[in-house]
Image (tube, rainbow, N blue to C red):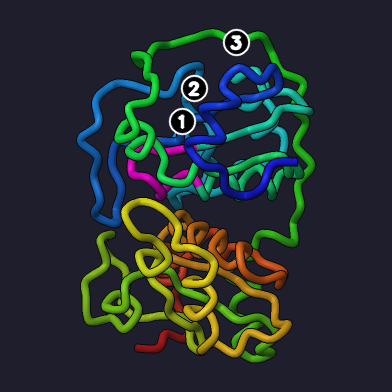
Amino acid sequence: MLPSLVSTAWLKNHLNDPKLIILDASMSENKSGPNSDIGNVRIPKARFFDLKNSFSDKNNSLPNMLPDEASFTVACQNLGIDADSQIVVYDNLGIYSSPRVWWMFKTMGHDNVAVLDGGLPKWIKEDLPLEPDQDSNYTKGSFMAKFRPQRVKNATDILRNIDKKEALIIDARSSGRFRGTEPEPRADLKGGHVPGSLNLPFTAVLKDGQFLPKEALRPLFEPFNIGEHPLVFTCGSGLTACIVLLASELVQKNPTAVYDGSWTEWGQLENVPIAT
């Protein structure tokens, strides 16, 4: 079983493993600001994981929503992913969209998945082999999703938790967006945060496109008095929440979930409380 993070050295040494599937989860644009100037290259044998299209619920008006079990199964099979595949996912910003894909596979019952720490920028910096991007057809895989509903929360769950206070809600947006002092990048959204939620910007758990070491991650969570509380992570659209969720799982054992609608949903709902 793969750990949650693997290094570029590990991947270099396992490129030819027969069960290994490398997924490129790079995005051409995002709402959080960072951009990549890397051209049309990929790690050898990588397969493009189309997060915005094949692997999002296109019937939902909210962005990046998790597809249903059947749709996820078909999209994975089309990429040639098997039930026993070892999956390593990376992106072109170091750490950005790849943790979302890691979380998706975990949520769909496939635990043998890892994020490449440092992603494509670190791979290139170390002068490791590359190949041009190209369209490919794959032999249909045997992957079968097994949805784990406890890993996904909706607005009703969040509203109920405001009163019950069973889970801790951790918001991965910037402190300005959390407090409502910076504008939201999506139009028509209110500013602020879910009442009672805590703020840990995703940028705080990263340095130079890699996760901080565990000894530096632990102190970031200590002020929250997490104890044995379940943790629910949120952000703008459920993507960078997964960065902080993965950071959490690297250093503690609490149950974790993502509020998939995140602020794009909460910030446009009527009759829900908002704190600033």
Image quarter in which the C terminus is found: bottom left
Nearer the N terminus, badge 2 or badge 1? 1
Q: Indicate the position of residue 170 as horizontal and vertical percent values.
A: 51, 75
The magenta-colored residue range is 90-98
Label 2 sits on a secondary structure element that is loop
**Mark 2 belongs to which amino acid?**
Ala
Q: 152 left or right of 41?
A: right
**Does residue 272 appear anywhere in the picture?**
no
* Nearer to the camera, 269 or 152: 152
* Nearer to the camera, 208 or 139: 208
Residue located at (28% from left, 81% from top): 180
**Mark 2 — residue?**
46
**Does residue 110 appear anywhere in the picture?**
yes
Residue located at (41% from left, 40% from top): 119
Q: Find residue 138 and name its label.
A: 3
Q: Check disc 1: other Cα within 10 Å, few if <14, some if 14-19, many if 20+.
A: many
Task: Using the numbered discs, state the Cα–Cα distance from disc 3 to disc 1 in whole angstroms.
Answer: 15 Å
Contact between labelled residues 1 and 2, with CB atoms less than 8 Å apart: yes
**Mark 3 belongs to which amino acid?**
Tyr
* Nearer to the camera, 236 or 218: 218
**Mark 1 — residue?**
24
